[in-house]
Image (cartoon, rainbow, N blue to C red):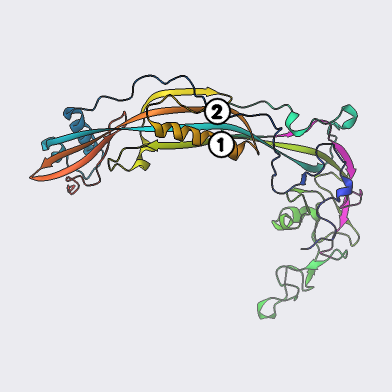
């Protein structure tokens, strides 16, 4: 059904508010750049991380127990290879994981409108509206994603509804103001299959519906007038009881007034940068996200600096790259509230063993001694 009249208020209806001249009227959120603060990414680093650059390699007993547990966790795996294997070699490798987190805040203002039902009109008479980045908002828990919508102080106003011309009602153009609509059972024919008279409309092909009866159907949901693409303003009923009767604005209770204000959407995100510095040991690094390492270094503050005093040069490079990327990517569209970064040492041991005269290999990784054994020889155990 098409309903005449504009779906959104004319721009002339909205007051000009300093600092909010070009904001959106509904639709997609557009986040404003934060105030420009001088930021210098220092070349110098933090204090040197703790002087422990390796973890003692696991012994044969720990390697065997890890593989036995791995087999036990798989219903169709036999434990015999793990229990009977003969060790040939254990090769330890140390992998480093650098992780940077930047907790950012973004702000997007937009005009909102809703039916007026005696809300407090906090307009510019109470003072000038604060700029978007000066609206007081409580920061949630650090490094946790969150979102909040608030009304910007001193931006509220009440306007006459542009859709119903402040009458609180609009004429129904589905019945063309006759009060009659086509029968939905016989589709206006007056009869059904076999030329039997339609009992629903008594053969007239048209029918009347009261507003109350209509509201019990699913029909009105597709016949409401939308403003800003979200909220219904004038509720247009079909099949009115009287030819010239108009439907009252259900949401505005027929008052014919709209309440406008600027709504600020504040979004907090935890943005991550992670890089693993590996040795060429053949272990798939994508699996490292499932294991823990031993933390060698951790720092948290408003702005962290590249780690310089670390024996592994690639970690220093990763630190510089991550910090630079975050400031470049988020610094112009969001406010970085807090940053933290860390370095973990993840132990990986490549185990070579022999079972039934054949050589095999598996990996034990992380502080939990998790096993990666894609070619475990005991996979063909049959469950009786």
Which numbered tag is attached to residue 62?
none
Whether label 2 touches label 1, CB < 8 Å? yes
- Where are the magenta residues, as a range? 149-175
The residue located at (73%, 31%) in the rendering is 133
Q: Helix, strand or loop at disc 2? A: strand
User: Picture coordinates of residue 199 (x, y %)?
Assistant: 72, 70
Quadrant of res 15: top right
Q: Report if residue 165 lies within the magenta region.
A: yes
Residue that label 2 marks: 339
Which numbered tag is attached to residue 326?
1
The residue located at (45%, 36%) in the rendering is 274
Q: Report if residue 217 lies within the magenta region.
A: no
Majority secondary structure of the magenta segment?
Answer: loop
User: Picture coordinates of residue 83 (x, y %)?
Assistant: 13, 35
In depth, the one of 248 and 299 nearer the eye is: 299
The residue located at (69%, 56%) in the rendering is 218
**Most extreme residue toward the left, as rendered?**
357
């Amino acid at each position: 059904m098409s309903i005449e009249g504009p779906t959104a208020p004319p721009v002339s209806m909205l007051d000009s508010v300093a600092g909010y001249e070009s904001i959106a009227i509904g639709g997609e959120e557009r986040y404003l750049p934060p105030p420009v603060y001088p930021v210098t990414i220092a070349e110098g680093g933090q204090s040197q991380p703790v002087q422990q650059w390796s973890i003692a390699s696991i012994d044969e007993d720990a390697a065997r127990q890890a593989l036995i547990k791995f087999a036990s966790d798989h219903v169709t795996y036999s434990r015999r290879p793990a229990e009977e294997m003969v060790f040939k070699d254990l090769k330890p490798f140390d992998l480093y994981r650098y992780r940077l987190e930047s907790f950012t805040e973004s702000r997007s203002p937009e005009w909102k409108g809703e039916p007026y039902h005696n809300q407090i009109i906090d307009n510019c008479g109470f003072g000038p509206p604060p700029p978007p980045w000066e609206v007081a908002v409580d920061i949630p828990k650090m490094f946790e994603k969150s979102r909040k919508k608030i009304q910007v102080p001193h931006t509220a106003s009440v306007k006459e509804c542009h859709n119903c011309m402040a009458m609180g009602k609009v004429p129904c153009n589905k019945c063309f103001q006759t009060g009659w609509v086509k029968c939905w059972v016989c589709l206006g024919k007056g009869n059904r299959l076999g030329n039997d008279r339609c009992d629903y409309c008594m053969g007239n092909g048209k029918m009347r519906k009261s507003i109350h009866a209509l509201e019990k159907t699913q029909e009105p949901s597709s016949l409401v007038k939308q403003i800003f693409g979200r909220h219904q303003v004038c509720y247009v009923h079909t099949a009115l009881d009287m030819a010239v009767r108009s439907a009252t604005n259900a949401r505005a209770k027929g008052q014919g007034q709209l309440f406008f204000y600027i709504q600020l959407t504040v979004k907090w995100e935890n943005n991550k940068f992670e890089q693993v510095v590996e040795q060429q040991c053949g272990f798939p690094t994508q699996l490292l996200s499932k294991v823990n390492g031993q933390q060698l270094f951790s720092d948290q503050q408003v702005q962290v600096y590249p780690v310089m005093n670390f024996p592994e040069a690639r970690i220093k490079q990763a630190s510089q790259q991550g910090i630079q990327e975050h400031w470049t990517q988020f610094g112009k569209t969001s406010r970085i509230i807090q940053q933290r970064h860390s370095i973990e040492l993840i132990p990986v041991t490549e185990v070579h063993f022999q079972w039934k005269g054949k050589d095999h290999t598996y990996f034990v990784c992380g502080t939990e001694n998790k096993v990666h054994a894609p070619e475990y020889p005991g996979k063909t155990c049959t469950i009786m």
